[in-house]
Amino acid sequence: MVPLWMYLVVAAALFCLGVFTVLARRNAVAILMGVELMLNAVNINLVAFWRFVTPATMMGQAFVVFVFVVAAAEAAVGLALIIAIYRRRQSVVADDANLLKW
Amino acid sequence: MELTAEIVVFAVFSIITLTGGVGVALTRNLFRSALMLLVSLFGVAGLFVLLAAPFLAAVQVLIYMGAIAILIIFAVMLTRGMVTARRVMNDQWSVAAVVALFLFAVLAVIFVQVGQGESAVLPLNPTGDPPADGTAALGQALLDPAQYVLPFEVAALLLAGVLSGAIYIARDDEPDEPSQTRG
């Protein structure tokens, strides 16, 4: 069996790629993709801990199902916001949507 | 550690996942970036199969790759002219790279420290076997009043509210309709 820490290291690498994408990309759609990468890294961690620590109860898998739901909700609302901003400003660069920035 | 088939499969799916992640972060063309996101999600589904969660792998392929990634590709297509930008990174990309690398270094050192050796806290091998029919057990846990039926119903309400809210936000209500003449 592949030990638990290897799964955790892979998930940490995926999470950090997501962090970099969110912080560094200018396009708002790319930022949402980075959020999806981070959520997937968390899902790997949840399933790995479920398999290694509490495989008898379904706690970890149930959490992953709820993360799926929240990720779908986040993607739907985020993309709707991006399309609304694009319709107003003809741009999806995050720096251009600075009306509420003080 | 000997080179078993499971290690090889784990390495293959890890490389697929991380290659997709690097592609999402660095590809200049946004459409190709979305395709790399699909690759990364597929790798995660493979890791779920390795971790004895085949139902979650199927849901990952159906919901994430089939719905969310396609939704993102739709958004890429609808915001045309933004696919190939001259600058894809903002001014703070170097700081972001340092932050991400530092975070990964800290996490990796901690995980290796607590994961192996004499003072390992994390288990090297699973502490038990999952139920024989894991999918049925998951379904019963989600609908069991003593376990997760309340979060399950709240998640259903959240999805219904969020999707109608998304339609409302993205709806085209610019004043080009004759019923909204101003003044």
Image: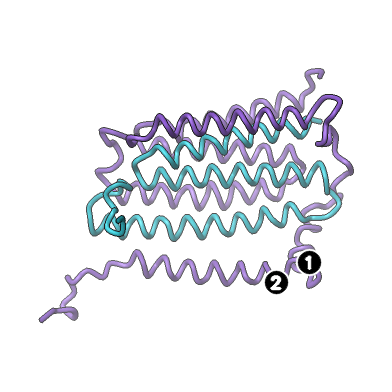
Chain colours: A cyan, B purple
Name, please, the residue furthest toward the front: A102
Q: Which residue is drawn at 84% across and 29% down?
A: B119
Are discs 1 and 2 located on one and the same chain?
yes
Could you tell whether A53 is left or right of B30 in the image? right
Q: Residue at x 50, y 46 (%)?
A: A35
Could you tell whether A16 is left or right of B7 in the image? left
Is the residue marked by circle 1 packed among few (<14), some (14-19), or many (20+) residues within 10 Å? some
Q: Which residue is drawn at 28% across and 67% down?
A: B172
Using the image, name the chain to which the residue with label 1 belongs: B
Could you tell whether B104 is left or right of A60 in the image? left
Q: Residue at x 77, y 24 (%)?
A: B5
Using the image, name the chain to which the residue with label 2 belongs: B
Q: In which quarter of the image is residue B182?
A: bottom left
Name, please, the residue furthest toward the top: B2
Give the residue pinned by disc 1: B147
Q: Quadrant of residue B173?
A: bottom left
Q: For residue A21, which numbered disc appears in the image?
A: none
Q: Work out which quarter of the rendered image holds the N terminus of chain B and state it.
A: top right
Residue B60: percent from the left, percent from the top?
A: 61, 48
Q: Looking at the picture, which amino acid does disc 2 mark?
A: Leu
Q: Looking at the picture, which amino acid does disc 1 mark?
A: Gln
Residue B167: percent from the left, percent from the top?
A: 39, 67
Residue B80: percent from the left, percent from the top?
A: 27, 46
Q: Work out which quarter of the rendered image holds the C terminus of chain B and state it.
A: bottom left
Is the residue marked by circle 2 packed among few (<14), some (14-19), or many (20+) residues within 10 Å? some
Give the residue pinned by disc 2: B150
**In terms of secondary structure, where does tag 1 sit?**
loop
Q: In which quarter of the image is residue B103?
A: top right
**In terms of secondary structure, where does tag 2 sit?**
helix
Q: Distance between the residues labelled 1 and 2?
A: 8 Å
